[in-house]
């Protein structure tokens, strides 16, 4: 697995909005909206070669394996519930559409490195200029909208489903998250997860109505960690909205951190929303450093301890990836 992480091993390297293939071939996205379509990858005049197309399997779950046979991502589909569309999917989409109409997000905040759509984020984070961990701040109106979404049973179900997938397919990494988050929330009892049935400390609702991402890495997330992405909308997933994993050369039908990914654009009259759950790498670093800043932590160390910490930082990525599970390991559990 290609290493694209910071020297500390906690977070990924900041991306500049282009994949290595785009850079080498000179096909940069021209604006705030993704422009690469399926013919660019599979047509007779394709711009990018070597990509594999992965069809949607409904409620079936499909792992994505690295060269060592470890599951580093899971294409989860949805819960095996015959009423999933009626009871979860459709109400969630309607709630996102309503939130998008009511949210107060500036034009500047709606144009960002991930694309052209308004995001609302909630939960707890550390890094990006924060002196210490704390809750993400929103205005009165947006806070009310977020509270409505996070207390909505359909999003609680989606959060729990994603957490269950994580626990089943990456149990060692899940335990790593669980132990660290337990320490964190025991220390900071005034903070709370967006969803109590979720393992992640933060979430973002991308309110569309045409949420299709430009190529990017969620580099502030734990470099070897997992996040959950849920897509919603009335678009034709066979024609648009696909998830492009550039580093893996995979394009996945996608019905309604350290991998470079983006989306195929949807039709002009279609709608697409997404929600994500994640935990900042800075939170793990803060916990491991005794609930203090990196500067304060290193000042407290002896020269020998600093050398040992730097050695651990170099090995952190490999150790983290070592928490991923192979299919044989999962079958043996």
Image: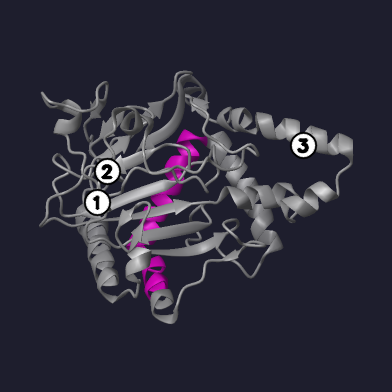
Magenta part, dominant SS: helix
Mark 1 → mark 2, Cα distance in angstroms? 8 Å
Looking at the picture, how far across and down is residue 32, in whole percent? Answer: 28, 53
Judged left or right of residue 138, residue 10 is right
| Looking at the image, residue 328 lies above or below residue 267 | above
Name of the residue lying farthest toward the front: 26
| Earlier sequence position, callout 2 versus callout 3 | 2
Q: Which residues are magenta?
A: 145-170
Confirm whether residue 205 shows in the render: yes
Q: Which residue is mark 1?
A: 33
* Residue contact at pointers 1 and 3, CB within 8 angstroms: no
Considering only vertical position in the picture, is 171 above or below 274?
above
Report whether residue 193 is seen.
no
Q: Secondary structure at mark 1?
A: loop
Q: Is residue 32 magenta?
A: no
State yes or no: discs 1 and 2 in contact (Cβ < 8 Å). yes
Query: Circle 1: is it few (<14), some (14-19), or many (20+) Cα within 10 Å?
Result: many
* Residue at the disc numbered 3: 309
Left or right? Give the position of 332 relative to 246: right
Give x and y (percent) for residue 166. 46, 41
Is label 1 or label 3 in front? 1
Image coordinates for residue 333, horizontal then vertical, percent = 52, 27
Check if residue 163 falls in the magenta segment. Answer: yes
Circle 3 Cα neighbour tier, 10 Å, few/some/many (<14 / 14–19 / ≥20):
some
For label 2, the residue is 29
Give the residue at x 60% y 67%: 191
């Amino acid at each position: 697995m290609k290493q694209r992480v910071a020297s500390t091993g906690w977070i990924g390297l900041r991306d500049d909005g282009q994949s290595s293939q785009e850079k080498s071939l000179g096909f940069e996205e021209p604006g705030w909206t993704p422009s690469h379509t399926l013919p660019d990858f599979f047509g007779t005049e394709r711009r990018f070669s070597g990509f594999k197309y992965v069809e949607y399997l409904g409620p079936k779950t499909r792992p994505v394996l690295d060269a060592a046979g470890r599951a580093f991502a899971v294409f989860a589909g949805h819960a095996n519930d015959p009423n999933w569309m009626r009871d979860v999917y459709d109400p969630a989409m309607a709630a996102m559409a309503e939130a998008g109409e009511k949210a107060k997000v500036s034009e500047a905040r709606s144009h960002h490195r991930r694309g052209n759509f308004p995001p609302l984020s909630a939960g707890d984070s550390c890094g990006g200029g924060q002196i210490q961990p704390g809750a993400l701040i929103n205005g009165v109106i947006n806070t009310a909208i977020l509270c409505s979404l996070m207390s909505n049973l359909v999003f609680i179900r989606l959060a729990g489903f994603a957490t269950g997938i994580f626990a089943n397919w990456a149990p060692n990494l899940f335990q790593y998250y669980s132990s660290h988050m337990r320490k964190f929330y025991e220390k900071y009892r005034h903070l709370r997860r967006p969803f109590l049935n979720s393992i992640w400390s933060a979430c973002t609702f991308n309110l569309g109505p045409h949420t299709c991402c430009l190529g990017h890495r969620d580099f502030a997330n734990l470099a070897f960690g997992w996040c959950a992405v849920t897509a919603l909308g009335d678009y034709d997933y066979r024609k648009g909205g696909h998830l492009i994993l550039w580093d893996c050369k995979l394009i996945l039908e996608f019905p309604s951190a350290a991998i470079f990914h983006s989306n195929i654009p949807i039709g002009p009259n279609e709608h697409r929303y997404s929600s994500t759950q994640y935990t900042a790498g800075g939170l793990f670093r803060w916990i491991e450093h005794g609930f203090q800043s990196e500067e304060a932590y290193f000042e407290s160390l002896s020269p020998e301890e600093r050398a040992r910490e730097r050695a651990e930082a170099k090995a952190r990525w490999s150790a983290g990836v070592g928490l991923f599970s192979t299919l044989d390991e999962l079958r043996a559990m």
